[in-house]
Amino acid sequence: MSIEDRLKATGKNIEGKIQEAVGEVTGDTRSKAEGQAKQDEAAIRHEVENVKDAAKNLIDRA
């Protein structure tokens, strides 16, 4: 598990939420979509870290 990678993903998620909210308030559909995309990217990064953790646990048990 890389704490640094998880923190980066969390930061990207927060950035995306803010951008999405600003897009919603201003009516800027492009900003809103970009914010949603950043949140999706962050979710994927978190899942990658989960897979890494699961693989490490399997290796450690062997």
Image: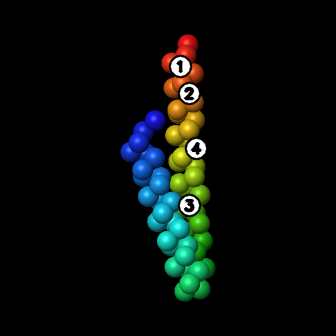
N-terminal of the pair, mark 4 or mark 2, is: 4
Q: Mark 3 points at which residue?
A: 39
Q: Is mark 3 on a helix, strand or loop?
A: helix
Q: Name the residue under label 4.
A: 47
Q: Name the residue under label 2.
A: 55
Q: Distance between the residues labelled 1 and 4?
A: 18 Å
Pointer 3 with pointer 1, Cβ within 8 A = no
N-terminal of the pair, mark 1 or mark 4, is: 4
Q: Is mark 4 on a helix, strand or loop?
A: helix
N-terminal of the pair, mark 3 or mark 1, is: 3
Position of residue 37 measured from the top left corner of the image (x, y, whole percent): 58, 63
- Which quadrant, please, contains the C terminus? top right
Instruction: Identify which residue is drawn at 59% across, 86% down.
Output: 27
The disc labelled 3 sits on which kind of residue? Gln
The disc labelled 4 sits on which kind of residue? Glu
Q: Residue furthest top?
A: 62
Vertically, is 25 above or below 46?
A: below
The disc labelled 1 sits on which kind of residue? Ile
Q: How far apart are marks 4 and 3 (CA)?
A: 12 Å
N-terminal of the pair, mark 4 or mark 3, is: 3
Crowding at mark 1 (Cα within 10 Å: few <14, some 14-19, many 20+) = few
Pointer 2 with pointer 1, Cβ within 8 A = yes
Q: What element carries label 1?
A: helix
Task: Please give the label number shown on residue 38.
Answer: none
N-terminal of the pair, mark 3 or mark 2, is: 3
Crowding at mark 3 (Cα within 10 Å: few <14, some 14-19, many 20+) = many
Q: Distance between the residues labelled 3 and 2?
A: 25 Å
Q: Name the residue under label 1.
A: 59
- Picture quadrant where residue 57 is located: top right
Q: Is mark 2 on a helix, strand or loop?
A: helix
